[in-house]
Image: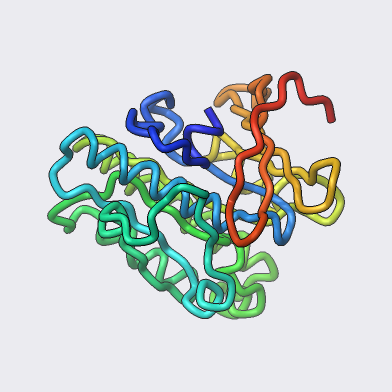
């Protein structure tokens, strides 16, 4: 699953999102700093757009929400074998947002779009919620939590609306906590996100392990795919190094 979503082998034509159940419309990619999360998100956007074009979808569109300054300073790396001039990039719309209010405005207008996207990606979702600003806005010490809950609820409703018309997934990324491999705001995400892709550092510098875990809606128990993807960032490329079976933490 992970290799079809986040890496390129030159033949990623089947829609990689078809393997998800309808109730897994919100996905999360979580990893440590400088682990290639933005590159993985962009490759995900490319794969979805390429699959939609291959299936003769009418005007496929994948929306990539991000902070302009951050993207300009650390642009994503492409997988080896992808032509930088590929027509697939024309189906990826980069939309710059500055804060959580910009994100809510985008999703609040979903029902007004003439063409709903095939997927929406948000880079570094948690960083759009400034703790001090959110506390002042809601006059509450837990203002950031309230803002994230409000935003995720709106995202959930918008994506569900899109899936009544067709098919659309939302993929968020965030950073691990300092004490482990869970996203910083796991206690908030777990209400809406039931499929999480987790990045861990590999056995050598610059290598990483990406695996998927799906959570039950009823008891929050999780199941992991026994196959994990090993990758690295080398020579300004996102390099898929193969699958690892029964990866033990």
Give the residue drawn at x 38%, y 33%: 11
The quadrant of the rendering that contains the C terminus is top right
Q: Is residue 223 visible?
A: no
Residue 224: where, in percent of width, then height? 67, 23
Residue 239: where, in percent of width, then height? 61, 46
Q: Is residue 15 left or right of residue 189?
A: left
Q: Nearer the viewer, residue 38 or 87?
A: 87
Q: Nearer the viewer, residue 211 or 229?
A: 229
Residue 119: where, in percent of width, then height? 35, 46
Q: Nearer the viewer, residue 217 or 95?
A: 95
Q: Nearer the viewer, residue 209 or 188?
A: 209
Q: Is residue 131 left or right of residue 171?
A: right
Give the residue drawn at x 61%, y 27%: 215
- Residue 139 occupies quadrant: bottom right
Give the residue drawn at x 83%, y 46%: 180
Residue 105: where, in percent of width, then height? 34, 67
Q: Is residue 249 left or right of residue 234?
A: right
- Residue 161 occupies quadrant: top left
């Amino acid at each position: 699953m992970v290799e079809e979503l986040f890496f390129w082998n030159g033949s990623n034509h089947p829609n990689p999102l078809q393997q998800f159940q309808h109730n897994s419309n919100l996905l999360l990619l979580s990893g440590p700093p400088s682990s290639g999360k933005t590159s993985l998100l962009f490759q995900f956007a490319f794969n979805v757009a390429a699959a939609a074009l291959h299936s003769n979808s009418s005007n496929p569109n994948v929306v990539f929400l991000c902070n302009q300054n951050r993207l300009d300073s650390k642009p994503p790396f492409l997988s080896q074998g992808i032509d930088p001039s590929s027509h697939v990039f024309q189906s990826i719309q980069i939309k710059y947002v500055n804060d959580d209010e910009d994100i809510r405005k985008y999703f609040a207008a979903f029902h007004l779009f003439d063409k709903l996207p095939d997927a929406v990606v948000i880079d570094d979702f948690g960083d759009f919620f400034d703790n001090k600003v959110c506390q002042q806005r809601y006059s509450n010490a837990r203002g950031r939590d309230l803002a994230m809950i409000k935003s995720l609820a709106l995202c959930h409703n918008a994506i569900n609306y899109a899936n009544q018309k067709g098919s659309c997934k939302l993929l968020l990324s965030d950073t691990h906590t300092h004490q482990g491999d869970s996203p910083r705001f796991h206690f908030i995400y777990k209400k809406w996100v039931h499929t999480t892709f987790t990045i861990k550092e590999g056995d050598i510098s610059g290598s990483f392990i990406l695996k998927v875990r799906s959570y039950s809606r009823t008891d929050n128990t999780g199941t992991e795919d026994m196959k994990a993807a090993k990758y690295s960032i080398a020579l300004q490329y996102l390099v898929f190094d193969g699958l690892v079976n029964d990866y033990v933490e």
